[in-house]
Amino acid sequence: MLDNKKGKASKAYDGDRTSPYWSIFEEKEVFKKTDIGVNFRQVGWFNAGVIFIKILFATGVLSLPSALHSLGAIGGSISIVAWGCFNTYCFVILGNFRTKHPYCHSIADMAEVVGGIVVKEATGLLYIIAYVLATGSGIVGVSTALNALSRHAACTVWWSFLATVVIIVTASIRKLQHVGWLTYAGFISIYAAVLIVVIGVTTRDRPAAAPQEGPYELGFVAINNPGFAAGMVASCTIFVSSAGTSAFLPVISEMRNPKDYKKPLYFCMTLVTTSYLAFSLVVYRWCGKWVASPSLGSAGQTIKMVSYGVALVGLIVSATLYLHVAAKYVFVRILGNSRHLQANTVVHWGTWIASTVILGALSFILAEAIPIFNYLIALIGSVCFAPLAMSLPGWLWLYDHWHYKNGTVKHKVVFILHCGLVLLGLLFLVGATYGVVIQIIDAYSSGTIGMCWLSRRKVFTDIDLKGSAFSCADNSNSS
């Protein structure tokens, strides 16, 4: 009987919304359409697409040229396209699963359906860690921009603190409908900045970071053999540049018609993947091994200041979205079954503001503890997005298509491939995390990341190490 109702409901969802079965889905949605209290369901599909793009297109594109140096131009290009298609398909799995289970606000809710409360809590923790780290990468990006614009006029820790305050304030806007309008400015900002750098690097005789006199080696290769650790870090960096699709789920929950999720998804992934490929290839072709991290600093001081000035809004908006979706998850978990979720009460506002402030503070601490941009991005991919964007989508597909294991040969092959999806996520979780940790240890050993000691006279000492934890040193190489 229940299966019969689900079947009729699924037909209603894909067909006429005037059907009485349509109400089944509306009743199960986390946010209800209402004229009383707070109506979160006001995001159209095009606005959702712009939000999707801004979630992905920011810190990801800034780390890709360095990844291409590790893998080579051909290997890196194949990796960008392959991971873009892979992440698109994995989110189609998530979106289809949500269509069948519309009460799922986040990927943690989906995990509960297939694995129970323990898997839900583990997934929820990974989700929060992922977007707290992503917010931290945004804080690093903003502090780098402020250092570049001011020529390191103040301690980097204070720039990071200022960035954190601004990000917390903007992320505290409750509705994605309102935050979404910021994404238009943010997307134009970061896209224009990347274009400025791409054009800027092609006008130079040699890379800005290369020796300006005498012979030098560009370091541009078609195919490279970086070794296991560096290769895993590079692959993970490219993977994570388009793997933040789990953040799309809260956006879908605030769409007027969640069923339209494929429209913004394909719009977003097509634009993002083609832009990643074009931008990263041009920067790598002209800068080679001398590419900066983040890549906005690759065309010299003047272009660096111009590009960071243009990109500043985009970097802030990206971090705002990361913090917003993480805080929204915590907010819904706490108030999901109470009247306070969509009512303007003290409990509602107190819970929401506390969520953004606490998670923002954690992002600041992590950003200062792991200040090397590429390592922070790769760590997000290996620890968090490998299980969230690989293993879990495979598991969700198996849950809905378990009958395929006893079906035709084609069905069995498809079933085995999705089992492989689960295993691939576990491989990346172990292998890529190992690679990132090894590279971070090497960075501390070589002095690329240094330890900052406290003194009685001043809290933060100006040591000459760009990547020191809680260091005042210039992370933009502008001073």
Image (cartoon, rainbow, N blue to C red):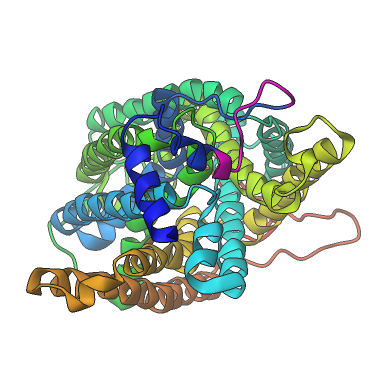
Q: Position of residue 402 (x, y in %)?
A: 30, 72
239 in relation to 163, above or below: below
Q: Is residue 35 magenta?
A: yes
Residues shaded magenta: 27-37
Question: Is 64 or 353 nearer to us in this picture?
Answer: 353
Using the rendered image of the protein, determine whether residue 312 is visible from the camera's viewpoint: yes
Position of the C terminus, as image quadrant, is top right
Q: Position of residue 329 (x, y in %)?
A: 63, 49
Q: Quadrant of residue 470?
A: bottom right
Q: Residue at x 77, y 46 (%)?
A: 338
Number of dots carrying numbers: 0
Q: Residue at x 43, y 27 (%)?
A: 187
Depth check, front residue: 274 or 270: 270
Identify which residue is drawn at 78% across, 54% down.
460
Can residue 97 be seen in the rendering of this structure? no
Give the answer, above or below, for where 301 lies relative to 371. Answer: above
- Residue farthest to the right? 456
Q: Residue furthest left?
A: 409
Where residue 222 appears, x then y in whole percent? Answer: 12, 56
Residue 40 in the figure: left or right of residue 343: left
Taking the image as shown, residue 166 lies to the left or right of residue 295, namely right
